[in-house]
Each structure stands twice: as C-alpha cells, then as structure tokens.
Amino acid sequence: MTSILAMQEVKKHFPVKRSFIEGLVGTKAKQVRAVDGVSLDIIEGETFVLVGESGSGKTTLGKLALRVYLPTSGKVIFEGKDISALRGKGLKDFRKSAQMVYQDPVAALNPRTRIGEAIGEPLRFHGVRDSSARRERVLKMMRKVGFDPAEDFFTRYPHEISGGQRQRVVIARALILEPRFVVADEPVAMLDVSIRAQILKLLLDLKGEMNLTLLIITHDIAIAKYFADRVAIMYLGQVVESASKDEVFENPMHPYTKALFSSVPVPDPEASRRRLIIKGEIPSAITPPPGCRFNPRCPYVFDRCRVEDPMLRRSGDGHLVACHLYDRAGQRAEGEHSH
Amino acid sequence: MALLVVKDLHVSYASPKGELRAVHGVSFDMQEQETLGIVGESGCGKSTLGLALLNLLPPQGKVTQGKILLDGEDILSMQGEKLRQVRGKMVAMIFQDPMTSLNPVKKIGDHFAEAIRAHDPEVTKEEALEKAGTILNQLGISSDRLNDYPHQLSGGMKQRIMIGLGVALDPRLLIADEPTTSLDVVIEAQILDLLRQLKDSLKLSMILITHSLGVVAEVADRIAIMYGGEIFELADVRTIFKNPLFPYTQLLLKLVPNVASKSTSLEWIPGSPPDLSSPIPGCKFAARCPYVFDRCKVDPPTLREVRPAHLVACHLYDEGAK
C-alpha cells in the first residue's frame, strides 16, 4: 500500500477584495479559508471519494492536488515529490501523470473544436507531432470510452452529441496521456439519472484497465456508497471524518456525517422519516466559528467544542474522526453534561 | 369534483429543427389536498407541463390540443385580468432556481408587497408587509429579513422566500418545479420538511415536479412517471415503489442510488432519451426497453387502468400479450 498522493496540513486561503474605503483606511484584507489544514493519504490504485456540500472546499482541494493552485501552507506530495517545488520537465511530467475530469462537459469543451481534435490536443502538447499517430491513439481511446464506430464521431462537434457522450469525450481527453492519477470533480452532477451510472461505471472500468488511482469529488453520498474504497467527509475547509467505505456507512461517527446521511431523501415511501435534520446552513469560510467548525449546528455540542478545534484522530481501524465526543476527555465531559 | 383535470394535453415548441412535441397526450386528475409527484428526466416534458398548468408557456410554446380545467374552469381560454387573478390566488408556482427568480435590486419585503397588492390594491403596503412577516415566521425566517436584499440571503433561505411568495395569496394548488435541485442535501431535507408542514397546515394541493425519486417518495401521495412527453405510469406512491409495472419505472428504481439499501451495484439504462423533434412511431421507450417486441415499435400504447387505480401505458399488459 504505497501512497500516491499525500497532503500534509494543506491550507489554501484566498484574499477577499477590499473596498476602496477599506483600502484607504488600511483595513487588513480578509481571507476565505477555503481549505484549512487538510491531511490525507491516497493509496495507489484506490478510488477515494471526497464528499462535501457546496462551500466545503472540496473543489479547491481537488485543484490543490493537481497544482492548479499552490497551497498557502502545507505540502502536497505526489509519488514522493513535493509538487509545489516542481519546475520544467518535472512539472511537465507531473501534468502528464495527473489529470482532471471536469464537472460540466459543455463548458469543458470548445464548441468549435471537433471532438477528435479535443481529445488529441494533450498529445500535441506533450510532443506527439505525427498527426496520423495522434489520430490512431485518439481513435483507440474513443473506442475505450464507448464511441462506436469511433471514426464517425471523430469529426463531430460537441453540440452534435448528447450530454453523456460529451462527458465521455472529457474522460477520454483526461486519459489520453495515460495518467496514473485522475481527479474527477462532480463527474456526473450535470447528467441525467439514467446516464449517471453508465458514466461512473465507465470511469471505474477504465480505472481497472489503465491502473489509475481515482479521486472523486462529489456532493452525492450515494456515489461514495457505490464506488468508493475509502471516503473522506469535508466540512468548511476541513476533513471531519475519513475511513473505508464500509466503516463510514456502517459506523458514521461525526455528527455532521450522521446528519448528512440522514438528510438524503430515500427512494422508499415506507422508509422511516426519523431524521437528524440539522438547523442552519454552512457558515462563511471567511469567519469560521471558533472551536469546532460544526459546533453552532451540532446537536451534541458541549462547552469544549466552542473553544477547542478537534484534531482528526484515529478512532478504530483506519477510521479517523475530528470530534471531541470521541476523545477520552470528551466522553467524560459528555457524560457529565448528560447527568 | 376534482381540483384539476388535464385532458389529452399536447404542447409543442417551434424550434429550428421543426416542431418539438414536448408534451404528447397527457391526461390526469387531481383531488383537493393531494400531492402529485411528476417524475422524469430532463427533456421529458415535466416542466413544460407545469408551465402549461398556469397558462404560462413561453411564446414559442403552444398548446395544440387538450384541456386544463382548474376547479372546473378552463385555464387555457383565460386571458388578461381573469388569468392574473387565477395565477397566484388559485394556482402558484415555485421555480427551480431561487437565485434567478428574485429581483436583485428589490428588498424581500417589496417582493411580497408587490405580489399581495397586485391582487388586492386595497391592501396598504404596511398591511402587506405585516402579512409577509407572518409568512416568514412560518417558514422559520425572522421578519427582519424583509429589509434584506436577495444577495444577503443564503440559497436555502432564498428558496424559503420563493415558497413564501408562492403561498402568499393562499393558493389552492402549488406547483413546485425541482424545488430542491439547486440545494445541498442538508438544506434539501429542511425544505422538504417545510413543504410537508405547509401542505398540512395550509391544506394545499401540490404538484411536485422532479427528477428525484427520493424527493417524491418523501412528499407525494401519487406519482406520474413521464418519458418523452407522455405519462407512462400513474399510481399511488407505494404502488410505484413496491410494484412498478412499466419497464422504465422498474429500471429507474434500480438505478437510483439508495443510501439506505444494502446493495452496492447499480444498473443503468442503455441509450439516451428520445429526440422529440421527429415523430416516433410506436412506444417512445421501445428503443431502450429490455422487453421490447414487434408491436411496441409500431403501435403507441395508451395509458389505461391495468389494476385498480394503477395506470400504465405498455403493451406488456395488453390482453394476450404474454
């Protein structure tokens, strides 16, 4: 079990633009703490699913993993190398080995580029000059993602194919350089339910065939349930829980994870409506609450949560959780609280 | 008497590719205080159907055939002032995207005052705002928010405001088009909870248009499954989930991820939804149906009662088909 990508205490803060007046009086620029101290390890060959609501920082984390952003502090290590330090050929090699599948296949494709060219473009950047060799590789990739006959689709424009097919093009383009690590940010969020499963299944099949490691970023817990090896839950810039899929679904520990799971509408009219509905909404990442970030919405909050930020700690077999309820001291405090 | 009767409704859009038949022969009834879920994928005609119920189709859309009777009155033949009075008071709509449905330069209170006073000019602005405050409290929002502009509110709060505007004139029928699609799950659960409460406390009838079987399972009494502009199955919520008859419904249930289920394998439907700009002979689902046989390709099935209160349009249930 070797780690392919490791994050160590990674932070990414974005400055908020100051107003003219604020600039004049010298108010300090505020920061959006999009990712605020995340450590995680992605193991070679696994499907790691990162779940979070909008505003949790999950997309920023995905971009940090691919060096679209450089971290404000902390390190991102890919195959043993700090990717922030990469330059020149090292960086180009990294770009070849780590690729992204984007959410919106309409926005990700140039409407005036034929899909065969779009898929072949990364090859051109990475030195495959011979156009007939490029064409061969593109056609091979197109067959892999399910275009049959590939030749017929090669010269089509994005508007001439369906949404599901467009997402196949985006996947083909990400995989044409035979990367080892792929980040898929909400790969099926824009697709219809009847198409989603096909595309996810395709991603997983290709993962097996091409020995990929996958990081899937999603708001949809069901995707984790069906496709993950391991799962991490993010809330307001931090990972609050991380474990193997079975652990997370059978034994969710963090109150936010529990609330998230019980919020998902269940397609069964006889399912119990007994739910942990949490109040309020995700607070601003500019002024996150002190202590545990979930404390203002947590049904089990106690005094310590309001002052001390819980660390992500091991609590059972590979199960990490950041919650004072599971500290020894925390349990005692809880016990006292309930008496 | 039924609150709403839709009879053989056909809606077409003029498009560069020719006539696009978005809704094709849809019929159903709704009783007072019932919640009907209309489920389908994008392009199945569910939103068009919702707009037609308010006689609110865009200019390129046209009802080419059929009737919509709301409390016995034909809404499609209404015009001007009469239509305006029916919209809002009799039937109101909540749209999918709360971000684009509110006017960014108007305060929340002004949205309410405008809606209330448009229907009853005698009401003063103060009275309207007072009523708006009461509605906001019902929705779990402080009435101080009446002085806020839309950008000062979060997505979940904006959707509550939209719901508040929808019920501001005490309509009898509320049509909600994907009311939770643009929201996060935790907020979605809050909004679904709110809709359930309102349905009881205001004795509302509701049409919930959605792609999510999970959402309708939570709120609806009856479900209509739409595909390619037609209703293919219509039954009460339990029947649809426990004993679906139409093959598309059966597949849809198998491919919807269910966090509560033990299974972790997903099925899917090969192919994609039909192109409605060219006429399709036979059943619209035939191209993707695992049970397709010769008749399906030539003869479009009609929606009929196959079992008590369970309507299906499928040749599999014809006499002697099997």
Image: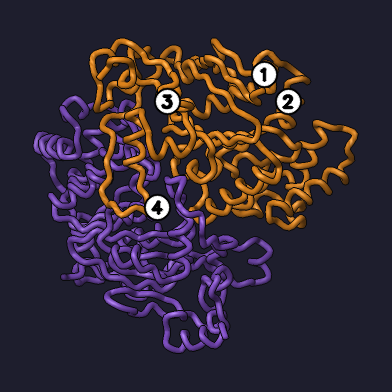
Chain colours: A purple, B orange
Q: Which of the two marks, 2 or 3, is nearer to us in this view?
A: 3
* Label 4 to label 1: alpha-carbon separation: 40 Å
A132 up-or-down from A85: above or below: above
- Do pointers 2 and 1 mark residues of a single chain? yes
Judging from the image, mark 3 belongs to the subunit labelled B
Judging from the image, mark 1 belongs to the subunit labelled B
Q: Residues within 10 Å of mark 4 (few under 14, many from 20)?
A: many
Mark number, residue B75: 1
Task: From the image, tell me which residue sits under label 3.
Answer: B307
Judging from the image, mark 4 belongs to the subunit labelled A
Task: From the image, tell me which residue sits under label 2.
Answer: B86
Q: Which of the two marks, 2 or 4, is nearer to us in this view?
A: 2
Q: Secondary structure at mark 2?
A: helix
Task: From the image, tell me which residue sits under label 4.
Answer: A220
A139 up-or-down from A221: above or below: above
Q: Do residues under tags 3 and 1 come within 8 Å of each other at their CB atoms?
A: no
Q: Residue B263, image x and y in percent?
A: 28, 51
Q: Do residues under tags 2 and 3 come within 8 Å of each other at their CB atoms?
A: no
